Each structure stands twice: as C-alpha cells, then as structure tokens.
Image (cartoon, rainbow, N blue to C red):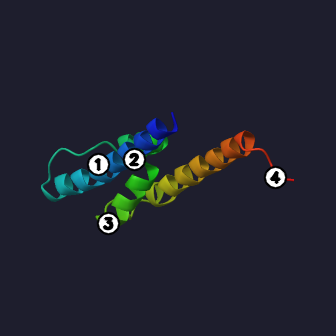
C-alpha cells in the first residue's frame, strides 16, 4: 500500500511539472492555455512539489501571487497532514 501511495505522489509531481512546462510552451506560442485552477487541482491532489519546481525551472507563473503563495501553502498543508498522520501511526518513544 505504501509503495502505491509513493508511486502516486511521484506521478502527480511529474504531471504537475509537465503541466508547467506545457503551459509555458503554449504561452510562448500564443496557443490555448491550461486553466489556472487545473494547477491548483493537481497540487491539491499531491503534485504541489512538481508544480512548485516547474514554476521556477520554467519561470512560469512566478509573477502571480496566488501561485507564489498558494502552491507553497498547499505543500505546507500536505506536509502538516502527513506529519500528523505519521504521529498517530508511529507510537511515541518515551
């Protein structure tokens, strides 16, 4: 089960990274663009690291406050939830 979850998170982050690359490419070509909410959906579904990395690797959406703040906030919330879950699963060492 853990391997499936890890694989899922890896795939979502690769997809988020790809979305940033693809949208940047479309922006340069003045083509149809990816809706901004799709980036947030992918981030919420586990691809926040990939979206965040793609923002800075491709210099895409870095001028938008909702991205420069929103994506890291989603990542921090995901880390917080993960740490809370781990704290409930792993017994505290006395």
Label 2: element kind: helix
Residue 63 placed where, x, y %? 38, 64
Which sits in the foreground, 91 or 12? 91
Q: CA distance from mark 1 to mark 3?
A: 12 Å
Q: Which residue corresponds to mark 3?
A: 57
Residue 90 placed where, x, y %? 72, 44
Q: Which residue of the protein is positioned furthest toward the left in this rendering?
A: 29
Label 1: element kind: helix
Above or below 2: residue 16: below
Residue 42 placed where, x, y %? 40, 42
Residue at left 50%, top 53%? 70
Compare marks 3 and 4 and give the one earlier in the sequence.
Answer: 3
Q: CA distance from mark 4 to mark 2?
A: 30 Å
Residue at left 53%, top 52%? 75
Q: Which residue corresponds to mark 4?
A: 93
Q: Which residue corresponds to mark 2?
A: 10
Compare marks 4 and 2 and give the one earlier in the sequence.
Answer: 2
**Quadrant hosting residue 34:** top left
Q: Do labels 4 and 2 touch, CB within 8 Å?
A: no
Q: Is 66 on the left-hand or right-hand side of 83?
A: left
Q: Which residue corresponds to mark 1?
A: 19
Residue at left 31%, top 61%? 60
Q: CA distance from mark 3 to mark 4?
A: 40 Å
Circle on res. 90: none
Residue 18 placed where, x, y %? 27, 51
Please say whether residue 61 is visible from this viewpoint. Answer: no
């Amino acid at each position: 089960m853990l391997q499936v979850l890890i694989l899922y998170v890896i795939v979502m982050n690769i997809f988020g990274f790809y979305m940033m690359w693809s949208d940047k490419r479309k922006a340069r070509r003045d083509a149809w663009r990816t809706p901004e909410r799709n980036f947030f959906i992918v981030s919420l579904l586990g691809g926040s690291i990939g979206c965040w990395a793609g923002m800075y690797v491709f210099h895409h959406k870095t001028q938008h406050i909702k991205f420069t703040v929103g994506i890291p906030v989603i990542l921090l919330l995901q880390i917080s939830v993960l740490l809370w879950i781990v704290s409930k699963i792993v017994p505290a060492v006395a």
